Amino acid sequence: MDAARGRGVGGVGGGPEAEAAEVAEVAAGAEAAGAARMAKSRGENGPRAPATEGSLSGTRESLAPGPDAAAADELSSLGSDSEANGFAERRIDKFGFIVGSQGAEGALEEVPLEVLRQRESKWLDMLNNWDKWMAKKHKKIRLRCQKGIPPSLRGRAWQYLSGGKVKLQQNPGKFDELDMSPGDPKWLDVIERDLHRQFPFHEMFVSRGGHGQQDLFRVLKAYTLYRPEEGYCQAQAPIAAVLLMHMPAEQAFWCLVQICEKYLPGYYSEKLEAIQLDGEILFSLLQKVSPVAHKHLSRQKIDPLLYMTEWFMCAFARTLPWSSVLRVWDMFFCEGVKIIFRVGLVLLKHALGSPDKLKACQGQYETIEQLRSLSPKIMQEAFLVQEVVELPVTERQIEREHLIQLRRWQETRGELQCCSPPRLHGAKAILEAEPGPRPTLQPSPSIRLPPDAPLPGSKGKPKPPKQSQKEEQWKQAKASGQLDKPPVPSQAKVAAAAGDACPPQDVPPKDPAHQDSAPQDSAPQDSAHHHSKDSAHHHSQESLTSQESEDTYL
């Protein structure tokens, strides 16, 4: 399985007026950068340079702290891994590669500082209001990605565009859990052997067992644990390395997950079925874009896998000059895999699309060599970006061709063994499929009052409960001597309301004569009579209280 997958990647290395102004600015920006660096040979950028055997072993022993850990820590204080390996006297370009490792550095015309600051301000506004911009002004985001994301915000923008930030929020602590797990030994050995091959002339990965290689190991190991059925593919290493150049390990891991599951699903599976399908799609689209190149490749019977596997699986990270790689990735994260198809079609069109260029390609070997050593002009940043933006290849065309090639595959080879999720074309589709967490709406009163403050419109303190008010009135009347016993009508009313549940057994019968004489004979009444009155009064008060409590409960 490892060998098959290794061979698979080891081949060739406002409104309408405002939008029109933005498009014009894209073209103008491309022309302004016309004197930008011409494409170096694949080794000049570091990605394709062969490493000296044994110089950067990348073994587990080199990643683990050893007896000379203190010396390594002292060396790391020099400021970069390149300094720790004797490259302190070398110049480092703005991308982090060692200048002059295999050739002279091409001249690079910088973007004017004022323009760069304006772009940074615009991108900060977009990132701080990302959901609103994605919902209402996605075209503006696409145009700004075509112009290039400011270097200071590129890593953060990639996280937002890919949905990696949402994944991180939905899975807090997941990467740390995977990082602490031991991992599968068969994948760990393969990953360690590949560490020193990833951009060995970049200051982040030049050091044996340095911070860059350690983080790369952690990210790739975590992915094998996150997707054990998929494991590790060699083409994932340069993808993860590019991400680590722009963000920490945890954020790079979730962006790698989004690339493998949303942008390029099935590319890194065991049988490489998805990349074979896309090879047929690319070849079919080439017939419409450049019939001359399509006819030549058909006549030479060159399988698309021989020249497009590394292009697509590594997203051109090991093929183009670094400035072009970053611009392609900016558009790729925003618009999806159609950017990868467009870049591949542009390279094929300008490498094999004219009779003059085909004169040197008389056979398969010469044709493959022509695609191995692409002309620096067609890989130059300004030229390539303009060609990619203007090439009329849409998501609908890609999906239509995908269905055609899938049907042919099923007729000739049977069903696909890898059931990968559907491909999502760009940031907008990913956001719609996986919306970010939204804060719950809480009621927010416009007027806030202290707990003891009276309500507006009320006078003084709020009235006490009904039951407490009656008890207070009764106590005041009894204390003043105005009432010696409760009124008889109220007593009867309470007794009638209480019913069978609480019959007034102690209430004396109503005798008119006795009632008339009661005021006259009240003074000489004996103590027993007073006790009877107090008992009746106490029972009436209990009946009244219980009735009010029952009314309140009901």
Image (cartoon, rainbow, N blue to C red):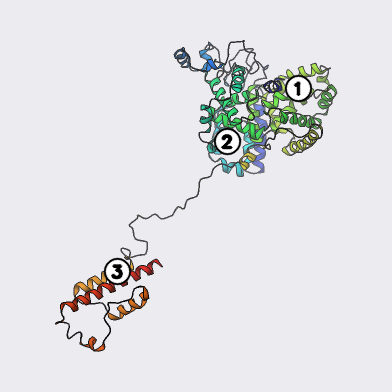
- Of labels 3 and 1, the one closer to you: 3
Label 2 SS: helix
Please say if the residues under marks 3 and 2 sit with CB atoms less than 8 Å apart: no
Distance CA(mark 3)–CA(mark 1):
95 Å
Q: In the image, which disc is placed on residue 469?
A: 3
Judge whether 72 appears above or below 238 on screen: above
Q: In the image, which disc is placed on residue 160?
A: 2
Mark toward the start of the polypeptide (3 vs 2): 2
Point out residue 115 in the picture as x, y percentages from the top left corner.
57, 30
Please say if the residues under marks 3 and 1 sit with CB atoms less than 8 Å apart: no
Question: What residue do we see at 63% from left, 22% from top?
Answer: 322
> Which quadrant is the N terminus positioned in?
top right
Q: In the image, which disc is placed on residue 411?
A: none
Q: Amino acid at mark 2?
A: Tyr
Point out residue 381 in the picture as x, y percentages from the top left corner.
67, 25
Q: Which residue is mark 1?
A: 306
Q: Amino acid at mark 1?
A: Leu
Distance CA(mark 3)–CA(mark 2):
64 Å
Q: Answer with left or right where residue 286 lies relative to residue 105.
A: right
Q: Nearer the viewer, residue 116 or 39?
A: 39
